[in-house]
Structures are given as C-alpha cells and as structure tokens.
C-alpha cells in the first residue's frame, strides 16, 4: 500500500471525520444543510478533502436518478456519504461534483 497524504485545512470551522478527526471540509464550503443521508441529516458541500471514492453507481434518491460514488475517510475507511457525478433531472444538475457528508459521521474542529 502506498503512503497516505493527508491535507489539513486552514482557518476556523472545520468538519472532520468523527472516528479519526481527519479534516474533510470547511464551513465556507457548505452549500446546504437540507439533505438526508442513509443515517439521517446530511450536508451538501462544494468540495472536500481526505476521502476516497468508490465505483460509480446509479441510485434512485428522493430527488430522482443520480450517478454517485460512496465516500470513505482516507485514514480510517469510515463511510461518510457520497459524491454526485451526474444528475438526470435538469433541476438537480447543481449537485454534480458536490459531496454529501452525513452528520452522524462528522465532528467539528475549531468552532469558537
């Protein structure tokens, strides 16, 4: 196995993996808190770091058919959510390239 390179995010209000505290995204990358994942509340982010993606698969979600990839933590391999690759409905195209991180698997770092 190769060497894992972990990126640390600068500034305040960092979202991290609840299990290993590796940085995943920042509050200013947060697009919406109005999403639901497999475990409940989920957040949509414009971008994130320190995750691996699974193979693309088509999923029928509440908002229609999408091509997604599961996201797991690069350090501890915990499931975190998914990445939107393609949205079949025109009204859902804004999700393409964005990631869902499920609240249950997140912790907050540097929230003063």
Image (cartoon, grey):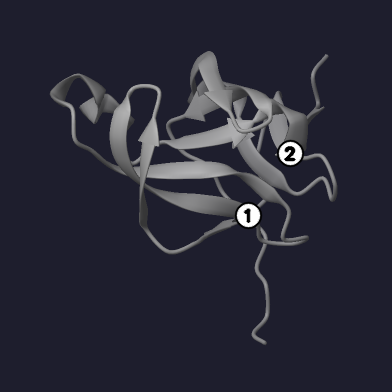
Residue 32's spot in the image, x, y percent? 48, 16
Taking depth in this image into account, of 7 and 62 the one nearest to the observer is 62
Residue 85's spot in the image, x, y percent? 31, 46
Name the residue: 63% across, 54% down.
72
- Image quarter (top left, top right, bottom left or bottom right) of the C terminus: top right
Answer with the quarter of the image where residue 40 lies. top right
Give the number of the disc on residue 105: none
Q: Which of marks 1 and 2 is in front?
A: 1
Which residue is under mark 2?
A: 16
Residue 23's spot in the image, x, y percent? 70, 44
CA distance separating discs 1 and 2:
12 Å
Residue 75's spot in the image, x, y percent? 74, 62
Left or right: 12 as drawn, with respect to 67: right
Which residue is under mark 1?
A: 72
Residue 88 in sight in this render:
yes
Q: Determine whether the residue tagged by mark 2 lies in a helix, strand or loop.
A: strand
**Looking at the image, is 32 positioned above or below residue 5?**
above
Residue 50 in sight in this render:
no
Category of crowding for the residue at label 1, using alpha-carbon neighbours closer than 10 angstroms: few (below 14), some (14–19), many (at least 20): many
Answer with the quarter of the image where residue 62 lies. top left
């Amino acid at each position: 196995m190769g060497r894992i390179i972990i990126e640390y995010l600068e500034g305040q209000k960092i979202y991290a993996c609840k299990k290993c505290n590796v940085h995943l995204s920042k509050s200013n990358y947060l697009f919406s808190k109005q999403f639901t994942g497999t475990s409940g509340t989920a957040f949509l982010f414009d971008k994130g770091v320190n995750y691996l993606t699974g193979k693309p698969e088509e999923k029928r979600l509440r908002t229609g058919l999408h091509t997604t990839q599961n996201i797991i933590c690069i350090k501890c391999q915990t499931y975190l959510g998914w990445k939107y690759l393609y949205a079949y409905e025109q009204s859902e195209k804004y999700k393409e390239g964005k990631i869902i991180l499920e609240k249950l698997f997140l912790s907050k770092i540097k929230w003063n």
